[in-house]
Amino acid sequence: MSEFVYPQALDIRPLHHPAKLTLRVPGSKSITNRALILAALSGDCAVTNALRSEDTEVMVDSLQKLRYLVETDWPVNRISVKSTADSLKKDAELFIGNSGTSMRFLTALCSLGQGRFRLDGIARMRERPIQDLLDCLKQLNVDAVSETQSGCPPVLLNARGLKGGHAKLNAELSSQFVSALLMVLPFAQGDSILELEGEIVSEPYIQMTVAMLQQNGIQIDTSTSGRFGIPGNQKLNCQVIDVEPDASSASYFFAAAAITGGTVRVEGLNEQSLQGDIKFADALAEMGCQVEKDPAGITVTGGKLHGIDIDMNAISDTVMTLAVVACYADKETEIRNVEHIRHKETDRIEAIGNELRRAGVEVEIWKEGLTIYPVEKFRATRFNTYNDHRMAMSLALLGLRSPGMRIKNPGCVAKTYPGFWQDFEKLYTE
Ligand SMILES: O=C(O)C1=C[C@@H](OP(=O)(O)O)[C@@H](O)[C@H](O)C1
Ligand SMILES: C=C(OP(=O)(O)O)C(=O)O
């Protein structure tokens, strides 16, 4: 991202007044990357209000390598995608960085093609699971394997088209496997049935995928829970897919209101959003904040914060945001049922637990969650961010009320929110 230059470390200045800010955050990563896949499958479609970040740029770059004609008009956040006679028909080597959505969605997309495809990423991507998706593709006669047999990328795909069929998929580690298959099976030669096994995680993202497909003319039978009926050989009917602001990115600003007793309004998000993470605002309401949702935006006003007991399986990208807010509550907060976040950009349960402990907070870490016990006074800390954008954005919030907090490698925010620090600065000036 040439637009932004990041220092090696960033000192967070305490905010000496309650936050008062209205902003619109950049586009949703999840919707942008789905929209790009759907645009490619439609053959000619534009994505508007798209997010520009590392995760979406690897998607754009990969689609180009797969011989799609992709044109970006970043000043207005518009991307147009057109297929060519060669799309998905030539061998390609894709480098996916650490974008889970891109790795999983593109593996599925390549299975529709003809040729040899190799998908790799940074070291951490080579530790993130993909075997359940590969096992499911195998049942559909797709030759896709983990190159090192580790169950993780690199993925090697020797594709000969997708016929469809009946397959079972374990969805315990990531919902992205489900979304990936749901986006390509409508384009298989024959009909398919996809049956989910295990306890499904991050379910709202599956609903987002189904909604985006159905909004663009694709039929999926969702009448039986955990089972999808997908007719093959369908056509996507879309000219433009518009992207909502990112609800996970909004969580940091809502949390700033909660922590400082101020008011923050994020425009462009409402109850109709496709993103499950708008429910983060409800978690803040449970903790004592006032939340108002209207058609044009969501407003959070901080109040006295109470510790809560919360299952965050469905909104797990906001676990670290909530963990930081919990540090300022009147009693402990228990965050449950999020074991799957151990497989993200870093092991997020360990990472947030350890960094909060370094700042003097008492934290109990267990297999599938953590308990945070608030303290009166925090220790000045140079926070490690584990190359995880959400660690950096969440831990910065701690510095709004406590002096001496420093964020190492603040540039890791570029994964989903390259301009985060500029927007964070608005808390001081507006
Ligand atoms: O489908 C998506 O867009 C996403 C699904 C979630 O992943 P898991 O299903 O792996 O929890 C979420 O954490 C990720 O940021 C985006
Ligand atoms: C987990 C995340 O991303 P991904 O799985 O798409 O890499 C995230 O953005 O928090």
Image (cartoon, rainbow, N blue to C red):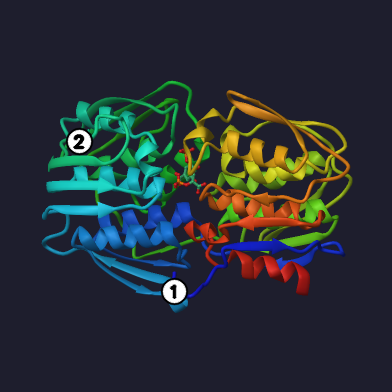
Q: Position of residue 344 (x, y in %)?
A: 48, 40
Q: Residues within 10 Å of mark 2 (few under 14, many from 20)?
A: many
Question: How many badges with numbers are in the image?
Answer: 2
**Above or below: residue 378 compared with residue 428:** above
Q: Residue furthest top?
A: 198
Secondary structure under the numbered disc 2 in the rendered image: strand
From where the camera sits, is residue 294 visible? yes
The amino acid on which the numbered mark 1 sits, given as a three-letter code, is Ser
Whether the residue under disc 2 has CB within 8 Å of ligand 1: no
Residue shown at 60% from the left, 46% from the top:
277
Nearest to the observer: residue 100 or residue 4: 4
* Mark 2 or mark 1, earlier in chain: 1
Q: Residues within 10 Å of mark 1 (few under 14, many from 20)?
A: few
Taking the image as shown, residue 66 lies to the left or right of residue 372, namely: left
Q: Position of residue 12 (x, y in %)?
A: 72, 61
Residue shown at 63% from the left, 28% from the top:
369
Marks 2/1: CA–CA distance: 35 Å
Q: Quadrant of the N terminus?
A: bottom left
The amino acid on which the numbered mark 2 sits, given as a three-letter code, is Ala
Q: Quadrant of the C terminus?
A: bottom right
From where the camera sits, is residue 293 visible? no
Q: Position of residue 58 (x, y in %)?
A: 35, 58
Secondary structure under the numbered disc 1 in the rendered image: loop
Q: Which mark is residue 144?
A: 2
The quadrant where residue 86 appears: bottom left
Q: Which mark is residue 2?
A: 1
Nearest to the observer: residue 43 or residue 313: 313
Residue shown at 51% from the left, 31% from the top:
340
Q: Which mark is residue 243?
A: none
**Looking at the image, do the residues carrying marks 2 and 1 touch, with CB atoms under 8 Å apart?**
no
| Mark 2 vs mark 1: in front | 1
